[in-house]
Image: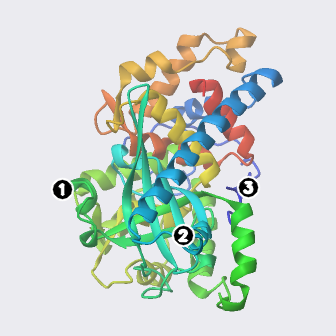
Amino acid sequence: MKNGYKQYTMREKNKPSARQDNKEGERPEDGGFTAITPFDDKVCLQHCYTSKPYTAQHSLRKLEAEDLAAERRKQFVVEQVMIDQLSRIKTSSTLTENMLSNKLRFDARILCRNGRDACRELIGFFFTHDKSITIYEYRQFGKNRTNALPFIQKGIYLHKCGRRRGKPYEIEDFYPGADLTFLTAEHQSLSESLRQNPILIIRITVIDEEALNSLRAICKGNKWDLGNPWNDEENIRLALQEAMKEKLKKREVRTLTGLAKYFRQLDISGSGCLGKAEFKQALQMYHLDISEKIFESFWLILNENNQGRVDYRTFIRALVGEMNEYRKSFVRKAFMKLDPNKTGAVSMVDIRKFYCAKKHPQVLAGSSSEEEIKSAFLETLENACSNPQQVSYSEFEDYYEGLSIGIMSDEDFINILRNSWGI
C-alpha cells in the first residue's frame, strides 16, 4: 500500500511559545498563529501510543487470522465473478476461461463523506483481453450468510477526470492510491446517497502485485507512454502541501477538524461542494493564507470542469495531502469495529466504552489515570463533531488525518490505533 506515497516527515520542533486559548473561528494576533493551546496538548497525548500493543506471538496469530479471513473473502468473490461472467457467455470454452483468467484483482473503497458507503468492502477486477472493469461488493449477512454482488457491472470505462479524461483504462492505471471515476447516471443500482454526485470516485487500496507484474509482461507490447509524472499540476500541489504542513505544525488536528467542520456548516444544500470565495474565506480564517497567484493556479487544477464549485473534501486533500492507504485501512478497521452495522455514525457513549487507555505510557507510569487520558481524547474528538453526541465516519477520519501529519512512521501511527481500539 505504501508504493506511490510520499511519507510524512517529522519537522524540527519549534521553540516553546507562549500558550493562549483561542475561541473557534478567531484569528490570533500577528505572530501568535502557531501558538500551542491546551487542545493541542491533549491531542499530543495520542502520540505516546507507539509501543506494540501485543506480544510478538499474539500479533502473529492475530495477523495470520485476519489475512486468512481476508483471503477467503477475496477467493469467494473471485469464484462468484467467474460464475457470473461465464453464465453470460453462451458457449463456454477453455479459450473463454483463459481470457477471463487474465485479470488483475484489487481491493477498493468509495471516496465519500457517508460512512455507510465509505466502509463498504469492494473487490474489483480489470480484464486485460478487452480492458474491461467490474467491481463487486462483499456482503456479510449475520454470522453464516455471505454474498458477492456486482457494484459496477463489467464494461469498458473511460476516465471521467484528470489528464487522461476520455481515455480508456489501461493496466498502468491500477496501483494503490489510484482513483477510478465513473458517472453515477450510468449505474442505476447505486444508492441515493451516491447518486447525489455526478462522479463516483473509487480508490484502489490494495492490488495483487504478482498478477500485476505478470500482466504487465504480457501487455508490454501495447504499453502506452505515461509521460512525465511530475507535471506542473503535480509540482504545484506538492509545493503547496509542503507549505501547508509547515503552517499546520503542532496544530494539525485542531485546524483540519475545524476546517472540515466549518465547511460542513457552510454546505447548507448538502451537496458537498463550495465556491471559490468560501474556500478563500476559510483559508484566511484558519491561517492557511496563500498568495492570490498560487490560489488561482490551484483553483484551476481543482475546477477542471469549470463549474465554479469544488467538493470540499477534495479541496482539503489537495491542499494538505492525505495519509496513505495503509494507514487509512486501519482507521476504517477501527471505525467498523465501533460501527459493525455500517450506519455511518457512532455514539459518544460507544466511543467511550471502546476507547482503551490502559497501555498509555502515562497510565503505565502512574502519572495519569485511564479516565484522564480517555477524557482528553473524547474532548478533542467532540470538538471535531457537528453533533457532540455522536461522531460520523468523516469526522473520525478527519481527526486521524490531522493526527497522521505529525507522525513519520507508519508503524507508530498504526500502533496508536491498535492500542486505542484493540484492533
Which type of secondary structure does the marked residue at label 2 adopt? strand
Looking at marks 2 and 3 on the same chain, the residue that comes earlier in the sequence is marked by 3
| Position of residue 356 measured from the top left corner of the image (x, y, whole percent) | 57, 18
Which type of secondary structure does the marked residue at label 1 adopt? loop
Residue 115 sits above or below residue 345 on the image: below
Verify CB contact (< 8 Å) between mark 1 and mark 2.
Answer: no
11 or 345: which is nearer to us? Answer: 345
Residue occupying the point 67% across, 59% down: 208
In the picture of the structure, the residue carrying the numbered disc 2 is 126
Q: Quadrant of the C terminus?
A: top right
Amino acid under label 1?
Answer: Ile
Residue 286 sits above or below residue 346 on the image: below
Residue occupying the point 41% across, 70% down: 89
Q: Quadrant of residue 49?
A: top right
337 or 101: which is nearer to us? Answer: 101
In the picture of the structure, the residue carrying the numbered disc 3 is 9
Residue 108 seen: yes
| Position of residue 177 measured from the top left corner of the image (x, y, whole percent) | 58, 63
| Relative to 202, 219 lies left or right | right
Q: CA distance from mark 1 to mark 3?
A: 36 Å
The numbered dot on residue 268 is: 1
